[in-house]
Amino acid sequence: ACFEVPLGEVSGPIESEYGYHLVLVCERINCPKLDGSNTRVVSNEEGSGTMLAPSNGAGQKSMEQQMVEASMQQVGFWLIVFLAGGVLAEISAKAAGVLDTLPWE
């Protein structure tokens, strides 16, 4: 059913083994026969409705941009994890009194 409904339109009710369903297709790729150059439904600037957006329209990021963004998110995540782990280890060692038993010069 999702490949028969135009973007942004509700279809249904559709019966399945789990009951009845309404289908709203918000995004679809590789289906130019149905959608032309449009691949997703987005809210318009006024917020009062929706419009179809082309696959290479403004606001979409290239694959390279997405990869850089994902890489930076991973670096930030692991940096925070390592810092938090070090701080937590130091607090735990102080609480257990381990730091006082170490031979410091």
Image: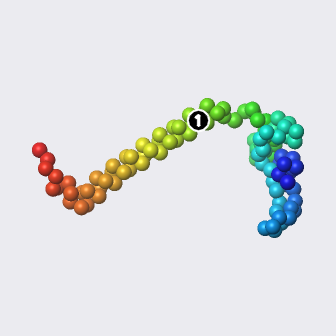
User: Helix or strand or loop: what does disc 1 sit on?
Assistant: helix
What x and y, as percent, mark residue 98? 21, 57
The structure residue drawn at horizontal position 77% and vertical position 41%, both measured from the top left corner, is 29
Can you tell which quarter of the image residue 38 is in?
top right
What x and y, as percent, mark residue 96? 24, 61
Q: Is residue 93 visible?
A: yes
For residue 54, side relative to residue 12 (left or right): left
The structure residue drawn at horizontal position 38% and vertical position 50%, both measured from the top left corner, is 84
Where, quadrant-wise, is the N terminus in this rendering? bottom right
For residue 32, side relative to residue 55 (left or right): right
The residue furthest left is 105
What x and y, as percent, mark residue 100? 16, 55
Which one is in front, 31 or 85? Answer: 31
Where, quadrant-wise, is the C terminus in this rendering? top left
For residue 2, side relative to residue 94 (left or right): right
Q: Does residue 25 sit above or below 65 in this rendering?
A: below
Can you tell which quarter of the image residue 63 is in?
top right
The way the protein has been coloured in the rendering is rainbow
Identify the residue position indicated by label 1 in the image: 67
The structure residue drawn at horizontal position 56% and vertical position 34%, both measured from the top left corner, is 68
Q: Is residue 48 visible?
A: no
- The amino acid marked with disc number 1 is Met
